Image (spheres, rainbow, N blue to C red):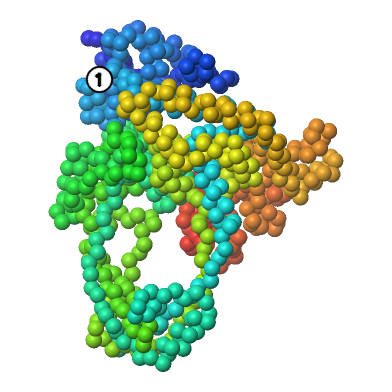
Amino acid sequence: MAKNLVIVESPTKVKTIRKFLGKNYSVEATNGHVRDLPKSQMGVDVDNDFEPKYITIRGKGELLAGLRKEVKKADKIYLATDPDREGEAISWHLKKALKLDEKDCKRITFNEITKNAVKAGLKNPRDIDMDLVDAQQARRVLDRVVGYEISPLLWAKVKRGLSAGRVQSVALRIICDREEEIDAFIPQEYYTLDAMIRIKGHKTPVAARFYGNKQGKLDISDKESLDEIMKACEKEKFEVDSVKKGRRERKSPLPFTTSTMQQEASKALNFSIQKTMRIAQQLYEGVDIAGRGTAGLITYLRTDSTRISAEAAELARNTITESFGAEYVGRARQAKQSGNANIQDAHEAIRPADVTLIPSEIKDSLSRDQFRLYQLIWRRFMASQMSDAVFETTSVKISAGEYVFSLSGSKRIFDGYMAVYVEADSKEEKDEGAALIDENTSIEFGSFDEKQHFTQPPAHYTEASLVHTLEELGIGRPSTYSPTISTILKRRYITKEGRNLYVTELGSVVNSIMKESFPNIVDLNFTARMESALDNVEEGKLEWKSIIRDFYPQLDSSVKKAESELEKVQIEDEVTDIICENCGRNMVVKYGPHGKFLACPGFPECRNTKPYLEKISVACPSCGKDIVIRKTKKGRVFYGCEDYPECDFMSWARPVADKCPECGGYMVVKGKKIACANRECGYVTAKKDEEQED
């Protein structure tokens, strides 16, 4: 029998796919890309029509030699890399590196790693799609010329180790613009006024919010206006003016795209974007399930489509009918039309590969994080195929002379999709007493509850809200959101505190340089148009090098101008109150390959360095000094006293400042709870401010 070779990127996929194929198939992995542009130089020949110079990635020579031996044994080679532009490019590079013959080498794709999907892919082999490859080449070359032209400029004008990127620079600008809005924000005073209404036959009064007058809505902007309204209303009789009953439907959500999965996992599970993608990759490539072996649990994780296959929809609807009843099955929904006109609809939405694998039944086979993300994806997909939730609404207007107060409420009369899933930021439906009132209800005024407020500035970006903005503006694609945010965090252009992202001084300087010298690159519309141009290359409507030809001359001229006109910027190191014991200077915070450390500013005369111990604003329960974040030799985080080794206090869980009200001992963070570290005590309470997970 003929020998077939299937080549994938990931060793995990090898394990999963081998299970589906017979002895006639050999499955090997590339461990990602095998060829790329060189790191030591731009690798793009600008004088030869921007021809890229690809080389074998360091360390991949031995792997390619092993693959060549396997190729010689095989009669047919199937390139089964991921079903997107990057996967197509990896297959093309493999074909070139292994010098594969066109007639013996075919490309296969599958949207999920299941037996049926893999076998269907093998039945439908095709040639490599050069439009997809060229779209990826265009993106890679664009990003390379931007990075290798501008980064040396930043090194010369600011400091070594900085970088600029086509998408990362725009993301940084978006965050900087928000910071400027927040800094420039001037709070405005306003007031709210509630009238506490007593209803005949009910002990508890209900609050009716001030609405306005008979002519329409009014805002209360100062104390004088508030006092005037209260004085006028106190003389009037409060009467029910109108009661409107209605019915409102809350639509079932669409299934996850990459962006919506990242956002919801951030809000619901407190996952970073990078963590979400790492766990989703594990679920896609395959997990060992007790009694079933290795199985891919979700479909491909990089997609901006909400389309669902007919087979998956039918299976989900059958499951819903059996579990909940026919009335819970929703109407067929059209895939959403994104703000991006060229939505990449080659894939389905992210969904369970097999909806019959109920999360609770396979929980023991998954890690805690794998289970939580799989459960979120499973519930979202099931909800997307279910009927809308239905609410009965009541809106009441109450008059007090010329002024009008209102209250409203809603009651869920059919849960629909909410039987399995509720969005993390969904507002809880409340009945504020409106349902107790009709046109004939007898009411009395009780008292006023007035409150002073100030308008709030725009919120700082979180990873989730930044991804939402990037997607809304058409900047980047599903595969770029995570590395973009990771890069600007790694470069220390931004910092993360809790969930919020803040711009550093370094980030502000880099953003100012980019805005001044390279306005096109950080222009939101320009970047979105560039994404659209890449989509046109993918669709075969545009030749890929034409994008580079149009873009490069202006970039080159801007770099030359900036080199001569930009002044050098000095970024000062963060000074600490820790004194260098060798020379008496205040030590400063430096950054190395493994993170922060303390160094003497007297370098090179004084070369003293120390570990940087980050305090968590909690006193050591043993000696009262500060608790700091430490790491074991293997990199595991723990919490210990700054006075180690004199004080040997340590805790794997993060301590908090509050003492246990039961035994007086110290307490630690446990998921969404705060628990006493003394297990015999057992005191547990809700966490006030959630810590960001790794």
Against 262, residue 672 (above or below) is below
Residues 216 and 134: in front is 216
Q: Which residue is mark 1?
A: 125
**Residue 93 image point, x, y percent:** 41, 17
Q: Residue farthest to the right? A: 583
Q: Residues within 10 Å of mark 1 (few under 14, many from 20)?
A: some
The N terminus appears in which quarter of the rendering?
top left
* Residue 622 in which image quadrant: bottom right
What residue is at 58 percent from the left and 57 percent from the top? Answer: 184
Residue 535 appears left or right of 606: left
Residues 155 and 431: in front is 155
**Residue 309 image point, x, y percent:** 22, 38
**Residue 370 image point, x, y percent:** 39, 42
What residue is at 62 percent from the left and 27 percent from the top? Answer: 560
- Secondary structure under tag 1 reads loop
Residue type at tag 1: Pro
What residue is at 30 percent from the left and 77 percent from the top? Answer: 396
Residue 367 appears left or right of 503: left
Q: Residue farthest to the top? A: 72
**Residue 662 image point, x, y percent:** 55, 67
Residue 317 appears left or right of 139: left
Residues 545 and 381: in front is 545
What residue is at 20 percent from the left and 42 percent from the top? Answer: 313
